[in-house]
Structure formats: C-alpha cells, structure tokens
Amino acid sequence: MPKLGMQDVRRRQLIEATCITVHRYGLGDTTVQRIAQEAGLSTGIVHHYFNGKGDLLAQTMRALLEDLRLDLVARLHAADGPQARLRAVLQANFAPSQFQPALVSTWLAFWAEAPHVPALGRLRRIYTRRTLANLRAPLRAVLPADAAVRTATSLAAMIDGCWLRAAQADGDFDGAAALACTLDHLELALGRGAVRRG
Amino acid sequence: MPKLGMQDVRRRQLIEATCITVHRYGLGDTTVQRIAQEAGLSTGIVHHYFNGKGDLLAQTMRALLEDLRLDLVARLHAADGPQARLRAVLQANFAPSQFQPALVSTWLAFWAEAPHVPALGRLRRIYTRRTLANLRAPLRAVLPADAAVRTATSLAAMIDGCWLRAAQADGDFDGAAALACTLDHLELALGRGAVRRG
Amino acid sequence: MPKLGMQDVRRRQLIEATCITVHRYGLGDTTVQRIAQEAGLSTGIVHHYFNGKGDLLAQTMRALLEDLRLDLVARLHAADGPQARLRAVLQANFAPSQFQPALVSTWLAFWAEAPHVPALGRLRRIYTRRTLANLRAPLRAVLPADAAVRTATSLAAMIDGCWLRAAQADGDFDGAAALACTLDHLELALGRGAVRRG
Amino acid sequence: MPKLGMQDVRRRQLIEATCITVHRYGLGDTTVQRIAQEAGLSTGIVHHYFNGKGDLLAQTMRALLEDLRLDLVARLHAADGPQARLRAVLQANFAPSQFQPALVSTWLAFWAEAPHVPALGRLRRIYTRRTLANLRAPLRAVLPADAAVRTATSLAAMIDGCWLRAAQADGDFDGAAALACTLDHLELALGRGAVRRG
DNA sequence: TATGAATGAGGATTCATTCAT
DNA sequence: AATGAATGAATCCTCATTCAT
C-alpha cells in the first residue's frame, strides 16, 4: 500500500526548498543539488516529481501565485463594498503569509527571468492581468472610467515597486510599510475621485 | 607601439554588449562568450579589461547608474523650483535614453541579483538612497515633513514598479506611460499638500 | 540503490591513473581529462571523489608515502637488531614494489612541486623526518651520537639522490643498483664506527 | 648605432628573471608574463630573444649548468692532485655562487621536467655524465677500478640528494652542510681504498 | 627594438540529467 | 519509490603566441 498523496508531499517539499534556496543563494546559484539537500532528499528525486529543474522552478512560481490568489479570493469573499475590496487586494499582497523575505526574494528572481522563459512569462502575465482586473473592478465603482484605469495601473506599479524594494532586505521596508504606502496612495486617488464626483 | 587609449573604448564596447546580451538571453544565460561575440571580440579580452565576468557585470550596472545620474544632474541643473526638480527626477528616469528595453531588462536582472552579490548590492543601495534624497529635498519645500517623506517613498516605489513593468516587454508600457503614471501620482500628492497647507 | 563502497575503489583507481599520467606526460602536462581517460572514467568524476585536481595530486602523493610506510613498517617488524633495521629501511626504499618507473617519476614531480604547494610540502616534511628518524635510531645503537646523526643525514641524502637518478629513466640505475650503492655506504660508515669503537 | 651586446644583456636579464620566477612560483605557475614582469620587460620580448617559452626554459637550464661548469673548470685548474680535484668538484657544487635557493629550486624543477622534455633531458644527461667523469678520473688515481666507479656513483647520488634536500627550503641544509656531508663520505671511501691498498 | 592588445585553444570545474541498483 | 554514482556538455578563466604600431 503506497503512501497516499506521497506525490503531493514531495512536490510541496521540493517547492518550498526551492524558495528557500533561491532566497539564500539567488537563482543563478540555485542548483538541483542544493534544492534537494535543503529538502533532505536526493538529487535524482527532482526528476521523479518534476520534468527537470526548469519545471520545478515554474511550478514553484505557480505555487507562489496560487497561494497569493487563494489568500486574495478569501479576502475578497469577506469584503463588503468597493473600498473593502480594494483594501483586500492590498492586504493580500502584503500579508505576512505572502510577504516573507524568502518568498519576496524568489518572486523577484522569477520576475527577472520571466522575459526569457516562456513558462514564467505566462505566469507573470496571468498575475499582472489578474491584479489589474482585481483593482479596476472596484475602482470603477467609485471613480470615473479613465481615473479608475489610471489608478489601477499606478496602484499595481506601486505594489510591484514595494515588492521590489522589500526584496532587497535592507530591513527598512516590511509588509506594514508597504501596506501603509499603498493605502495612502489609494486614499489620495479616491479623494480625487470623490472631489470630482462631488 | 600598440594603440593607446583602447582601454576606454573596449570597456564601453564590452559594457554595451553586456546590456544587449543580458536583455536578449537573460542574466542566467549570459556567457562571456556571448558578450564577446556581441562585441565582436574574443573571449579572452574580457579578462584583459575586467577582473572576470563578475567584474564586467558590476561595471555594467555601475555604468547604467552613472548614465542615469549624469542625465539627472543635467536636468536638475536646468530645473527651477521644487516642482520642476521633481518633474526632472521623473523625466530622467523615464527619458528615452534611459528607458530602453535593453537597459530596463538589464536593470531588472541586476536588481534580482543584487541581494546575492555584494558589489551589486552596494550599487543598488547607492541608487536607492540617491533617488529618495532627490525626491525628498524638493518635496520638503512644498509638503509638511512627514508627507514629504511618505510621498518620496511612494513615488520611489512607483518608479521602480514602472521599471519592473516595463522590463516585461508586454509592449503596453513605455516611458511615456510611466511618466504619466508617476506625474499623476505626484500631482495628487502635491494637491493634498496644498489642501493641508491651505 | 546505487553500488556501495565504490568510493574506495574509484579513489584508488584515480590515484593509480594519476601516477601513470604524471609518469607519462609530466606533472605540467597532466590534465584531469588525461587522468580520467587513463582510469577509464569521465572528467566529472574526479570532482566527485576529490576536491579538485590539487586534492587528487596531494592524495596521490599521500598514497605513495603511505605505501612506502606500510612496506617499511612490515620490514622493520621482521628485522632483528640495528643492522637488520638499517637494511630494512634501504630495502623498503628500493624494493621493486616501490621503485617502479611510474612511481619514481611521480615522486620526483611532487618533490619539485612541494616547495610551492603547502599540502605537498607537509607530506614531504613528514617523509623527511620519518626517514631520518628511522635511520638515526638504529645508527645510534652502533655509532657514536654525532656519527649517527651525520650518517643518517648522508644516507638520507643518498637515498633521495638515488631516487632522483632513477627517475631519469636512463635505464642504467634500478632498484638493485640503488640498494647496492646505499648498502655500500652504510657498510663504510659502520666500519668507521667499529674502528672508532674498537 | 644599436647598443652593442643588447641581445646578450636581454637574454641574461630574462634568464635570471626565469630563475627567480621559477623559484618563487614553481615551474607550473611560471608564466611568460611573470618572467617578463620580473625582468621589467614586456611579454612580447620573450619571443624576440628566444624561440618561445620552452626555449627560454631550456636556455635557462643550460645557463645554470654552464655557470656550474665554468666554476668547476676554474677550480680544477687550480687543484693539485687527485684529492684536491675531488674536493674541487664538491666545492664547486656547493659553493655559495651555485648553491642559492633560487638556483637550487630551479634546478630541481628542471630535473623533474627533464624526462618529459627532450631539450632538458639532453642537458641533464650531459651534466650527469660530466659529473661522473669528473669524479671517476681522480678516484681512479687513488682507488681500485671498481671501487672508483662505485664511489663516483655514490658520491654523485649524494650530491644530487643534497641539492634535492636543499631545494626544500627547510632552512636546515645549506651549502656548508652539503659540503661537509659529501666530504665526509669521500673521506670514508678514500679511507677504505687506503686500507685495501695498504 | 619594443610594446601590450588581441587571440583562441585548452584547462579546471560545475551541474542538469540519466540510470543501475 | 528512491538513491547517488556517473556522465559530458558548457562555463569561466589562463596563457603562449602573434602582430600592428
């Protein structure tokens, strides 16, 4: 009787080890052996559960985005009204569960690689579109159409900029700071909308 | 006697070739041979003018930041008043000379590598501090102290986020879009300052 | 599960291949690839079992000295009395098992490298001290103190000189010749001791 | 008017630089550039005055042996009688002018390389034959034929062994020690001859 | 004569991947 | 399912040699 779900266990094990390894050594110095060692497994195992290193990396990025998505969906579900939904988007992005050094680091590494690796590029585009959509929808409820689009774009840019900044581990920019920064921008943008509406 | 003054010529040649190569293949697939080939030189020459690949990469990033700095200094020199200076900072960041695909791509690759390479990390910190300082100074002239600091931080994040976005080559985000996005945010922030002041 | 216990087999295989390669091409033209080829293995394997080429070379020298030591220990164990022990030292040095062209050649190459490679220098010093100690002890039993020391020194020098000579592959100097040469010197020195004692 | 003898000046300059470089870095880490730098010249110069690196090395060894030969010839010329000639051979080998660390080091490096480089092998054989001849001739005057041959061989071995030992820079074996060691052996051998003759 | 820039072959080493066990 | 030994292509780097100046 084979252990049930062993496949999933191993896959998660390796994906988590990948995040830690990328965070610690950088993507360029992330080797299959280091990942396996971090996971406490042998090097050969990676090819049992993934189609090679590239696949493992892509699956890792997919897992990161999926975790973010699940968190966001839960928050949106609990949010009432456009402003609450907007805050939910920002909170999901900078919640402690997502905004850990190892994850932010990995995220940046994948972003830099995305233009050169189709599989990563696809994931990146999905994320970008999703984020913009998640911002535009509630913004349209409270702002004129063009302002909604522009605000979604600038908020999205600021979100990514905060991740970028946080990935540098200067220690002066954590999730709380990022949330404050983006919420402040949101408030400003909504204020303008209110004025224009009023 | 061999040709004199080739040092600068070759170094610039190789640095430019590095940008193009990183843009085209990604940092992970940027090899000394590819750089040399792009420059129309032999592989050995790289070690004649730089202390190996790592040094060439660091010098390339330094050159990028230096070019940006020089452009910015020129614009600041011509700017009159705090608002003009703020616009100068944004314009320098998104001017066509700086905001080309190959350069943006390279910039992102270095940013992702910076946490793992001391030489790159130093350059990144210099840039970060400089950008914040260049934003804070004029902002302090038109906003209350705490608002100036917060606005500088959020503007800086948005600038980096725009670079990040542009590096993805989706073709829907160029320098003009980035400039519009950040100028819009600046206007909002200044508007608030004016209200509070008034 | 992969084969167990290959470590020792492979290490010996590579060390022996190193001796042959150094003998055939000289240390300067001994490449990892040639060693691997001689061993019938791939180049990568060397770094699997040794910490690079330098380590393999050092381990090879260590193995040579260890083999010599083991042979000597066995002979000393069987030797009865100072003169037998002295002969044992010489016989061990020039026994066919130690005094083969490939080994002598390798030995000389390492000796020349020893002043420039700490790991080899250490091994060389161990050998030198050991040889002197092994000669002095029995000599002290049959000669005055100062004569014992002087004789040990000159015998050691002659031993090394014989190796040096044999490494040249002129074909006119084999283990038997070396043994005769050094035994002759020993007899002379002992003769003097006897006279002086008498 | 070209400088007279510039050729010889440069050649000696480079040969001396070669000795120093080999002594300092070992033959394996002796590069044309290092030699040129030590000589205060450019790398290209080596190919003006020598047929490449190999030729420079061979010429360096030749120069070493030639210096030794000239010194020996002078001493033999001044020597009166077989015993004086024998002492002259030993003194020439261990005179301060020959027995310097840099020279001994270089000598050993060449010895190790000789079996693999025809040009060096030839020089080594010339030296070996010459030394044996220089020892045998006077020994034949004071010893029976077979003893003369055997003593020449063992003295030659001891001489080489002393060089080998001295090349290790343990600091406990200089020219004086080597001379004492070999003179002691000579005295012993001659003593036997005398006894047998008497 | 002399330089040192430039070349490119060859070296050690790394690493994703395969496969016998 | 799992291991880790083994491979060999690919990378960075060194260095003897050439050559325009």
Image (cartoon, coloured by chain):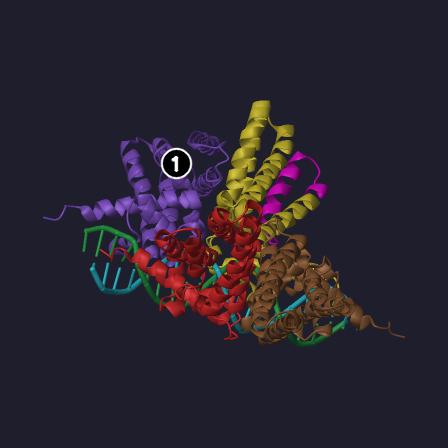
Chain colours: A purple, B yellow, C red, D brown, E cyan, F green
Label 1 packing within 10 angstroms: few (<14), some (14-19), many (20+): many
- Image coordinates for residue C82, horizontal then vertical, percent: 44, 51
Residue with the mark numbered 1: A99
The residue sitting at 64% across, 48% down in the picture is B66
Q: Looking at the image, can residue A115 be seen?
A: no
- Image coordinates for residue B125, horizontal then vertical, percent: 57, 39
Q: Position of B15 compared to D76: left or right?
A: left
Q: Is residue B95 magenta?
A: yes
Find the magenta span and give its range: B76-105
Is the magenta region chiefly helix, strand or loop? helix
Q: Position of C81 compared to B84: left or right?
A: left
Instruction: Return the residue found at the far front.
Output: D198
Residues D99 and A18: in front is D99
**Residue A153 found in image quarter:** top left
Q: Is residue A118 magenta?
A: no
**Residue D182 found in image quarter:** bottom right
